[in-house]
Image (cartoon, rainbow, N blue to C red):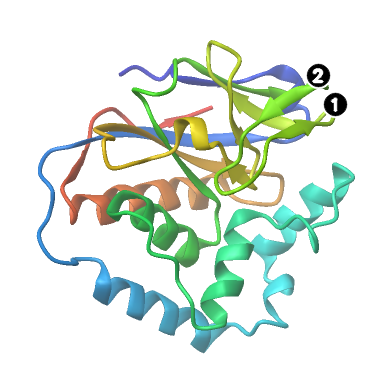
Amino acid sequence: MSCDLVKVSEEARGRGVFVVYTTVELRERADGDPLGGVVSDYVAYLRSSLTLDGLKYHPVVRAYRDFFWRLGIDPTKVRPSSEALARRALRGEFPRVSPLVDAGNLASLRTLVPIGIYDLDLASPPFTITLSRGRVKFYPIGGREQELPEGYPIMVDSRGVVVHLYAHRDSSLTSVRESTRRALIVGTGVPGVEKGLVGQAVELTVKLSSAVGWAQEGPTCEA
């Protein structure tokens, strides 16, 4: 894989959007629950360093919230995915979805950077992060069909299918499932968040996913 799998349009770049991404493939499913101890450690670390009330003041969380406010979205109602995950963890919950998704969620929990993971055999690369034109359909995981407003950053595949609502939610159409063998990992950046931190989140996802049988397939790229 060369570094042309994901691109950011000029209009989206004007919003300060950037991503770090790579691809992984399943080599062999791991036995047991290799990430179980990591879940306990990461949740304990978060709860020892942050409170539910103080989370919104963390500089990384603040950056994603500010990005949402600039879009005209109230982040107390539509939360960046990393903040929503951290809030659950601070309440003592951590959603176990699948080994690969769990790896991404753990990396997001540790860095507070939203991580998206997409089945490359269900999507049609390459992908573009752009601004919605209005009347665009989105089918979120665990939710009803939505019609997106104009001007919202989204990631679409070459067919125009919306696979990601930026820094918030992923599509059920291209989500990781039992049959997934190849996947795209994307760390979503916004103004005020260092590119290095987004890269660390992606690298940590790859490291954790290797414990459950996944291997990095392509280079780590920036867009």
Q: How dense is the environment of label 1, judged by Cα within 10 Å: few (below 14), some, or many (20 and up)?
A: few
Residue furthest bottom in the image? 48
Q: CA distance from mark 1 to mark 2?
A: 5 Å
The amino acid type of the residue labelled 2 equals Arg
Residue furthest front in the image? 144
Establish if 129 lies above or below 90: above
Q: Residue at x 44, y 15 (%)?
A: 124
Q: Which of the two discs, 1 and 2, labels the residue nearer the N terminus?
A: 2
Q: Residue at x 78, y 48 (%)?
A: 67
Q: Relative to 44, is 187 on the left or the right?
A: right
State the mark number for residue 203: none
Q: Which residue is under mark 1?
A: 150
Q: Secondary structure at mark 1?
A: loop
Q: Residue at x 50, y 88 (%)?
A: 48
Q: Residue at x 62, y 34 (%)?
A: 139
Establish if 28 lies above or below 41: above
Residue furthest top in the image? 159
Judge by depth and name the residue closer to the eye, 180 or 186: 180
Picture quadrant of residue 30: bottom left
Image spot of residue 71 (x, y percent): 85, 41
Q: Secondary structure at mark 2?
A: loop
The amino acid type of the residue labelled 1 equals Glu
Image spot of residue 87 (x, y percent): 61, 73
Q: How dense is the environment of label 2, judged by Cα within 10 Å: few (below 14), some, or many (20 and up)?
A: few
Establish if 197 lies above or below 129: below
Quadrant of image for the C terminus: top right
Q: Which residue is under mark 2?
A: 133
Quadrant of image for the N terminus: top left
Q: Relative to 207, is 105 on the left or the right?
A: right
